[in-house]
Amino acid sequence: MKSFFLCLFLVMSLFVNGQNLYIKTYGNEKNKPVIFIHGGPSGNATLFEGTTAQNLADEGFYVIAYDRRGEGRSVDPDAKFTYQEAFLDLNSIYKKHHLKKAVLIGHSFGGLVATLYTEKYPQNVSALVLGGALFSQQETYDHILNSLKAKYVNNHQQLNKISAVENLNKKSAEYRKGCYDLAGENGYFKMPNPTEDSKKLYAHYEASEFFKTNIRNKNAPLVFYKNEKLNNIDSRPFLKNIKAKGVPVFAIYGKDDRIFSSAQIDSMRNLVEENHFAFIENCSHYLFVDQQNVFISNFKNWVGKN
């Protein structure tokens, strides 16, 4: 019986220490560490890995990609999908790779995770980079629905679909999903004029093992909204606190990422200040693929190397 409890303790310890997380590193561990935090809930880092991680590492960075607990390749049927759980997993990565500080790249929902982590553990973050990151969730949902109502002003079928979403509980997974489903159906996440480089990157990803392991846990948002109280937030006050604590904050967005209103973008530009902000032409939500060279160039200029 004693040995049974010892084994159980060891298994639990392994998970707490992040050993069951999918984690992959790129580049020389002596270079400046960068941790990519993917979108979701129900996302993964496969697109970033399959297109960008090695290219960023080739520029002199030690890049760490991982899938949050219960999402993607980090399978865990008991995951709670809370921010606190995400913080524990990030801290386990710091411990596993002996990191004192790292640059965090937060993409989409990962921007909220990265922001809240940095606000709680500023000593662990050398810079926070928001890439197409959520920051004022209700404003995003309102913008999606209002812009679609303006587009379909005489289309009663579409207006009924929008109204059905609009009448859902605004702090529910169903409301979030409804907003993003409508955005996706209307091309809000797609760049208008794909470049030859972006076509090649997407094609390479779709032919890779990463695409084959593009695992998405459809239950993750439902559990997140059940367990996490901070499920529809405005993170701009946290970003102001982070700046006040001395952690540099940078933001990069695509001009064709249509889930954000111009007012939201202006507020982010004013918050981080002009020289810490980039607004990319012909670029939508997946900016590290849509305009990878511009994304990496801005990243290098902002955070430098060792």
Image (cartoon, rainbow, N blue to C red):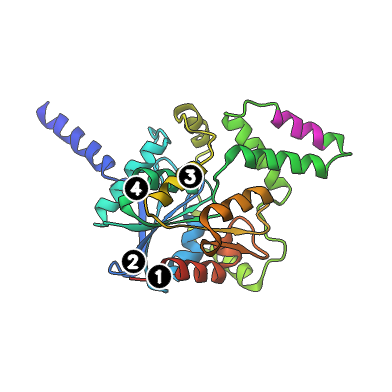
**Disc assigned to residue 32:** 2
| Mark 4 vs mark 2: in front | 2
Of residues 120 and 42, the one drawn nearer to the viewer in this rendering: 120
Marks 4/1: CA distance?
A: 22 Å
Taking 25 as reference, is 1 above or below it? above
Point out the tag, 2 or 1, that comes first from the N-terminus.
2
Start and end of the magenta stretch?
158-166
Taking 24 as reference, is 240 above or below it? above
| Proximity of marks 1 and 3: CB atoms separated by less than 8 Å | no
Q: Residues within 10 Å of mark 4 (few under 14, many from 20)?
A: many
Quadrant in the rendering for residue 147? top right
Identify residue for label 1: 304
Residue at image position (42%, 45%) is 241
Identify residue for label 3: 112
Q: Residues within 10 Å of mark 1 (few under 14, many from 20)?
A: few
Asked whether residue 58 is in view, the answer is: yes
Left or right: 246 in relation to 170 = left
Taken as a whole, is the magenta stretch helix, strand or loop?
A: helix
| Proximity of marks 2 and 1: CB atoms separated by less than 8 Å | yes
Residue at image position (54%, 39%) is 234
Q: Residues within 10 Å of mark 2 (few under 14, many from 20)?
A: many
Tell which residue pokes out farthest to the left in this image. Answer: 2
Is residue 160 covered in magenta? yes
Marks 4/3: CA distance?
A: 14 Å
Q: Name which residue type carries label 4.
A: Leu
